[in-house]
DNA sequence: TACAGTCGGGG
DNA sequence: GTGTACGACTGTA
């Protein structure tokens, strides 16, 4: 007897007795659990004696269904190699057996041995989270046949309506003790008291049973709520049914400190569920930035579980995609050894890499300027140049072979989908609900594109190769120089080059049309897509703060013709700037952006200055809320390892001394600058800080600094402004120093040290 | 004054 | 299940 349904794949995980467990949301809205047997294959190569020994060893095991000698491609070896192919009856058995094999035969090289079941299933059946499938299953709920009816690359997939339940405590548990939790489904919201464990767990189970959610969205679920609920359940002697698969408990992923994107990151423990997804919206960075649409998009294209896709782990998503590509292309996937030791001390530097090209900006205020960006430059170069570890590298961006390698093959559909989504965003009504959703999806894809480039240069990546990484940055510099030549030949002045962007100036060029020809020509000459980021009413490039004669790349702000601001590198963009300073600076910039043209700028500058004055006055009057003064800084060492503790580290030490709560490397520390010793106060233990305790000098200095950045291009002297900030009284009528701030318009300083340098490594001199 | 520690970037 | 790098800048010793 066979039943047949169509439905969306929600969850897939390994199961010791059933092989795989799959959850579907059927067309009729049922939530269906099915099981499926899946054979798993791994390969070994090496000395023939060793291989023979392995063959003998595996032959004895009943879970090994088949052993074969085959010839296959290793991505890093030009000629096909001889391998032993082992077919195992289930994923769980394969994991267990391989662990033993690898210990007994460490000298062999292994392939396809540590690929997740999600990826194996994706390679075999074309599945992914939210894939729409046609399934036949027997009376024991065993899948007999499974067909995927759509693809990861569909632009407008039809999705089921997901039921999401939101759980959150009534306050931030890192600061206070919550007394209730709120439970929300659609518009229905109820509050449950944490006081009585028995009643709470009982009611929660009732709700979970009644609603049967697909998603459980929590605040602090990973670090506080779920551990707390489990503890209360134990206390009450009742099982808490968080999973849809009631045979399972919560799967905990341990907390982890790791190094990524130049920073030490702390990833707290995570609570994963079976048959439904738990997402802690406070810790899932991906969720904060892109919401459900971005998360589902990312899960879809990477064929990774939704819970995993929600928590930003850039590497594993792209790594999963590359493995899937390799499986589909019949290329062996090298076994990824856990090189923990090597990671800690052997962060081998890439000395030959010279990073992206920079052409220092011409400091000062400019009009008749447009910014032109290459669209996803590095991914585009990888695709166009066919840059992959296993194929010959290109000359510039002219490919050396026709057959696409694993990396470009992985990137191409991703790149094309993102371009298509962006295109569609452009056609939708700006800021409409749909436009926002589509752009969230496009943003999620952007992350994957960026990380794919990074992975080429990462020695622990399966498909990484330093030379390939270099070939990409090489290509980038070549393309940017070409673009500069094209622009100059067409009579444009190049104000700044930055890795994948150009700032072009030509007298009288003030509309998008004025830049269409140069755009088209750059695109034609380089063979890559470029887009006009915008035409500026005016843009100001800032010099170094320590030496006014030195221009600083990518420290600028400007206003486009439509009035939107573009701001880079200044205080408001930094994560360690207190909100009060960032908000004041942003308001000042907003004043400037309201000037319709440079002629209106003097008045706008006066307004911006008033914003600054008012902010100072309200600070002196004690009217700035404390939380607006909180500084957030990352802790990157164990506290005892600091040789000269940063303010953040001092606050962390203070908190540790007072409460015993330790700040781990990668965690953020929030604090306030105070008078006396120590000069900081941890926000978590701040209690009620009195107004007199606040280090007013410090905050005045921080605000003045931010104001200087904004006003500097208009000829306002930093020192004078700071002096004024520290000495002026609150009384606006006494505003004498203002007389000293006559606005001068400064256009086009001479290029002080007109040299080129490099972003990232090396210092590239063109 | 030296230098240790943190941030940028993308959206 | 982890991109790399340097340069600018700040705060401490």
Image (cartoon, coloured by chain):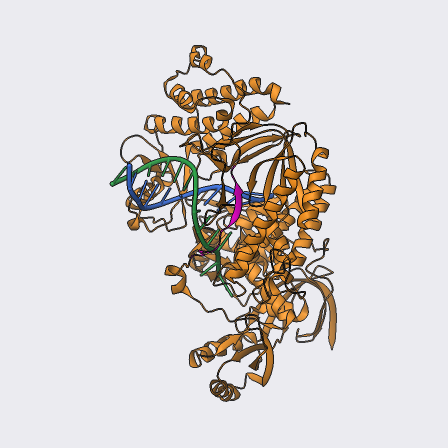
Chain colours: A orange, B blue, C green
Residue drawn at (45%, 49%) of the image: A762
Residue drawn at (55%, 73%) of the image: A77
Please state which of residues A703 and A90 is positioned toward the viewer in this rendering: A703
Q: Is residue A241 visible?
A: no
Name the image quarter holding residue A522. Answer: top right
- Quadrant where the N terminus of chain A is found in the figure: bottom right
Q: Is residue A705 visible?
A: yes
In the image, residue A735 above or below residue A17: above
Please state which of residues A592 and A298 is positioned toward the viewer in this rendering: A592
Please state which of residues A503 and A266 is positioned toward the viewer in this rendering: A503
In this picture, which residue range is highlighted in magenta?
Answer: A349-360
Q: Position of residue A181 (x, y in %)?
A: 50, 46
Horizontal arrangement in the rendering, residue A161 relative to residue A572 (left or right) = right
In the image, residue A139 above or below residue A202: below
Asked if the magenta segment contains residue A359, the reply would be yes
The mark tally for this picture is 0
Horizontal arrangement in the rendering, residue A177 relative to residue A38 (left or right) = left
Name the image quarter holding residue A278. Answer: bottom right
Q: Position of residue A655 (x, y in %)?
A: 32, 43
Q: Main secondary structure of the magenta part?
A: loop
Please state which of residues A198 and A253 is positioned toward the viewer in this rendering: A253
Q: Position of residue A748 (x, y in %)?
A: 55, 27
Name the image quarter holding residue A537. Answer: top right
Asked if the magenta segment contains residue A524, the reply would be no
């Amino acid at each position: 007897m066979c039943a047949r349904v169509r439905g969306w794949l929600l969850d897939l995980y390994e199961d010791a007795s059933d092989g795989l467990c799959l959850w579907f949301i059927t067309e009729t809205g049922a939530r269906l659990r099915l099981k499926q047997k899946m054979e798993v294959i791994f390969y070994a190569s090496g000395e023939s004696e060793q291989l023979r020994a392995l063959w003998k060893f595996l032959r004895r095991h009943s879970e090994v269904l088949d052993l074969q000698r085959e010839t296959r491609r290793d991505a890093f070896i030009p000629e096909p190699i001889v391998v032993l192919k082992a077919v195992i009856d289930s994923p769980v058995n394969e994991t267990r057996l391989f662990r033993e094999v690898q210990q007994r035969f460490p000298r062999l090289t292994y392939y396809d041995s540590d690929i997740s079941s999600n990826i194996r299933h994706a390679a075999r059946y074309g599945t992914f989270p939210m894939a729409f499938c046609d399934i036949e299953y027997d009376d024991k709920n065993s899948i007999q046949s499974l067909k995927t009816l759509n693809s990861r690359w569909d632009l407008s997939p039809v999705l089921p309506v997901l039921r999401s339940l939101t759980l959150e405590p009534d306050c931030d548990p890192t600061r206070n003790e919550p007394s209730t939790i709120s439970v929300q489904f659609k518009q229905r919201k109820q509050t449950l008291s944490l006081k009585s464990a028995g009643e709470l767990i009982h009611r929660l189970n009732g709700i979970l049973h009644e609603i049967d959610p697909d998603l459980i969205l929590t605040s602090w679920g990973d670090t506080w709520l779920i551990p707390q609920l489990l503890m209360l359940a134990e206390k009450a002697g009742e099982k808490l049914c968080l999973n849809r698969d009631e045979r399972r408990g919560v799967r905990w992923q341990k907390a982890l400190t790791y190094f990524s994107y130049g920073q030490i990151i702390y990833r707290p423990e995570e609570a994963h569920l079976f048959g439904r997804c738990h997402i802690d919206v406070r810790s899932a960075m991906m969720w904060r930035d892109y919401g459900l649409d971005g998360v589902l998009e990312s899960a879809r294209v990477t064929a990774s579980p939704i819970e995993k896709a929600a928590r930003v782990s850039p590497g594993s998503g792209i790594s999963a995609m590359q493995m899937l590509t390799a499986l589909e292309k019949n290329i062996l996937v090298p076994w990824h050894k856990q090189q923990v030791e090597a990671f800690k001390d052997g962060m081998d530097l890439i000395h030959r890499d010279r990073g992206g090209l920079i052409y220092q900006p011409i400091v000062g205020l400019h009009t008749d300027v447009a910014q032109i960006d290459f669209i996803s430059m590095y991914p585009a170069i990888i695709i166009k140049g066919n840059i992959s570890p296993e194929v010959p590298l290109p000359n510039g961006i002219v490919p050396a072979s026709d057959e696409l390698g694993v990396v470009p093959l992985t990137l191409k559909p991703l790149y094309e989908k993102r371009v298509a989504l962006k295109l569609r965003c452009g056609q939708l009504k700006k800021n409409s609900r749909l436009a926002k959703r589509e752009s969230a999806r496009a943003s999620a894809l952007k992350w994957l594109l960026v990380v794919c480039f990074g992975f080429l240069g990462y020695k622990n990546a399966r498909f990484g190769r330093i030379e390939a990484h270099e070939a990409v940055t090489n290509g980038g510099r070549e393309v940017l120089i070409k673009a500069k030549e094209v622009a100059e030949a067409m009579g444009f002045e190049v104000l700044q080059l930055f890795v994948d962007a150009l700032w072009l100036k030509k007298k009288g060029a003030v509309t998008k049309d004025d830049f269409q020809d140069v755009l088209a020509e750059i695109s034609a000459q380089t063979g890559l897509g470029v887009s006009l980021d915008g035409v500026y009413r005016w843009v100001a490039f800032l010099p170094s703060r320590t030496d006014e004669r030195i221009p600083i790349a990518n420290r600028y702000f400007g206003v486009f013709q439509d009035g939107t601001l573009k701001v880079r590198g200044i205080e408001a963009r930094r994560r360690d700037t207190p909100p009060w300073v960032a908000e004041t600076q942003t308001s000042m910039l907003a004043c400037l952006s309201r000037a319709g043209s440079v002629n209106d700028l003097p008045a706008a500058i006066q307004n911006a200055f008033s914003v600054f004055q008012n902010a100072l006055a309200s600070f002196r009057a004690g009217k700035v809320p404390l939380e607006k003064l909180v500084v957030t800084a990352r802790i990157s060492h164990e506290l005892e390892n600091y040789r000269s503790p940063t303010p953040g580290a001092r606050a962390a030490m203070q908190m540790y001394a007072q409460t015993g709560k330790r700040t781990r490397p990668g965690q953020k520390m929030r604090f306030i600058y105070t008078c006396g010793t120590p000069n900081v106060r941890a926000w978590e233990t701040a209690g009620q800080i009195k107004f007199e305790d606040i280090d007013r000098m410090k905050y005045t200095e921080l605000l003045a600094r931010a104001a200087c950045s904004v006003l500097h291009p208009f000829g306002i002297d930093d020192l004078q402004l700071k002096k004024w900030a520290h000495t002026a009284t609150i009384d606006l009528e006494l505003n004498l120093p203002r007389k000293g701030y006559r606005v001068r318009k400064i256009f086009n300083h001479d290029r002080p040290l007109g040299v080129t340098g490099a972003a990232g490594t090396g210092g590239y001199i063109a």
